[in-house]
Image: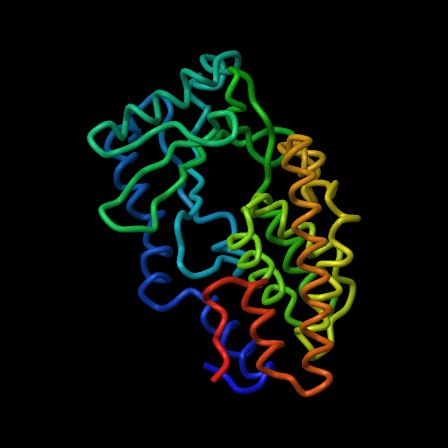
Amino acid sequence: MATTVHSAFDEFKKRLKVNGTELGLVNSRPASIKSYLGRVFGDDSDMPLLNTALIGSATRDTIIHPVDDVDVFAQFSAAKGAWDRYRNDSKTFIYRVREALSEYRVEIVGTRGQVVRLFYASGPHVEIAPVFASSAGGFLLPNGSGGWLTTDPPRQTDWINQRHSAVQGDLKGVIRMAKAWNRAHGAYFKSFHLEVLVAAAVTSLGNNSRTELRDLFGAARYFLNVQDPAGHSGDLSQYMTATRRSNALTALAVAAERAQRAVEAEDRGDSQEAIRLWGINLGSGFPAYG
């Protein structure tokens, strides 16, 4: 509980950070994936497993508590003809990876069936992105329809880190709060899309998280069509249907209006009302007044 809006935000930011137990599990997942896949795709395989690595929000320090899923790259060698075999049939490739994990609870998931989800007895579960290195840079990932798309998570992470430094404030903290809002209000935005949207919309930061978040909600509508900073996936909002986009814009407008009322309440000394309004915006994890 909190008696000032400032202290409520400080406590909320701490709550959003991944705790030590979760962090240990998150960081250990790539090694366990490597162990599982390495049994089948060893050095004598026609497509040996080269490496597994944590990717996504866990590497960018934008993941929030509680953690549902983490993303892991599984890079395979194409040197023994694997690329020639699967260049026109990425579906068979991803199902082969899935079958290597058949003794565990797994399924093909993703917007178009691009990753393999591995379930653990207790979370976080893992979404495995099986890839080959691309000669043009980045990595080749199944696109769900038999072809391939290119991606480059390390470059995406570098871009977020550069934006965090450029705004001279806690951009990643703002991203985590935006994710909490998204989780509490329909989850209209995919995680990476929202990260890039926030990083593009926020040009500078000071020391007032409340006005910064209010301004973000007001500006976000103009940044829905942000592009993949790694230059591979194009418009990151392309997964949105017309209805989903409309609902997302409405949710942002409501959040901006409520945030403005919260700032006004704080300015007139009504911390209880301000905390109540921010709690509606940011979800049940936001501290109550008291």
Q: Residue at x 43, y 19 (%)?
A: 82
Residue 166 drawn above or below residue 7: above
277 vs 285, left or right, is right
Quadrant including the N terminus: bottom left
Q: Residue at x 73, y 44 (%)?
A: 224
Residue 209 drawn above or below residue 7: above
| Picture coordinates of residue 246, whole percent (x, y) | 69, 39
User: In this view of the protein, which residue sits in the foreground, 252 or 228?
Assistant: 252
What is the number of callouts on the image? 0
| Picture coordinates of residue 162, whole percent (x, y) | 69, 60
Residue 9 quadrant: bottom right
Colouring rule applied to residues: rainbow
| Picture coordinates of residue 133, whole percent (x, y) | 53, 32
User: In this view of the protein, which residue sits in the foreground, 262 or 139?
Assistant: 262
Residue 14 drawn above or below residue 24: below
23 vs 260, left or right, is left
Residue 275 quadrant: bottom right
Residue 33 quadrant: top left
Residue 249 drawn above or below residue 66: above
Q: Residue at x 60, y 64 (%)?
A: 172
| Picture coordinates of residue 83, whole percent (x, y) | 48, 19
User: In this view of the protein, which residue sits in the foreground, 252 or 130?
Assistant: 252
Q: Residue at x 68, y 56 (%)?
A: 254
